[in-house]
Amino acid sequence: MKKKSTRKLVAIGILSSVAAVLMFLEFPLTVIAPNFYKMDFSDVPALIGAFAFGPGAGLVIEAVKILVKTLITGSPTMGVGEVANFLIGASFLIPASLIYYRKKTMKNAVLGMVAGVFSMIIIGSLLNAFVLLPAYAYFMSSPETTYTVDSFVFLGSLVNPLVTDLPTFILFAVAPFNLIKGVLVSSIVVLIYKRISILLKHKDSE
């Protein structure tokens, strides 16, 4: 039991380190969303950890990668961006890993990731509309500069002509961004599934 727990902790630590490194390799998708929406592939090791050891492990990896990046670079958004990253990542990992855990097969992995992508789109859209964008506006405002949700909508309209108000910002910027991210992360996990399947199924044989 002790050996099993140690192996699990080591695996989660390695996956967290990889996720933290990948989080630094972020890039914007300025064809659909403003450049403060950053794409990265740090959810790949988090999803692998969730598949291997359950949703809790995936959430730990999500939290550790964000903590590491914040300690190194700080938080220009007063923590709002970090909270957003964790919540939206969790909305993807939890349904994906719960479905996969019912029966650990490639089919269930794919079904889980499809459910996770839809969950991320829906929850990400709702969070952005009602929590995250208002929080961004509040914490980024100063006596010299006042931000509102409309400020972000305007920035979105500069890169995406389909954006004209908050609903279109969510529909044509936030939702497609999360869709693309979810599909890319899922595709990578599918491509490497056979190589990591030993790790994923090894837990059950211990």
Image (spheres, rainbow, N blue to C red):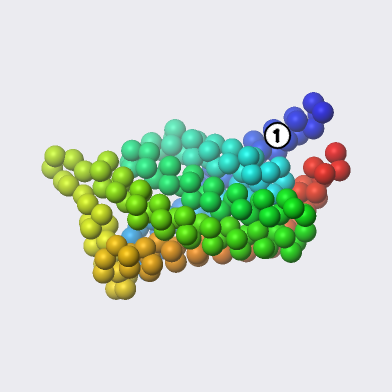
Please name the residue shown 33% across and 68% down the image: 168
Residue 111 appears left or right of 59: right
Q: Residue furthest top?
A: 2
Q: Quadrant of residue 18?
A: top right
Q: Quadrant of residue 103?
A: bottom right
Q: Secondary structure at mark 1?
A: helix
Would residue 129 be visible to someone looking at this image?
Answer: yes
Q: Tell me which amino acid carries mark 1.
A: Val
Please name the residue shown 42% across and 58% down the image: 125
The residue nearer to you, when weighing 43 against 20, is 43
Residue 145 appears left or right of 193: left
Q: Quadrant of the N terminus?
A: top right
Q: Which residue is mark 1?
A: 10
Residue 33, image x and y in percent? 36, 63
The residue nearer to you, when weighing 190 against 18, is 190
The residue nearer to you, when weighing 202 against 23, is 202
Please name the residue shown 43% across and 64% down the image: 175
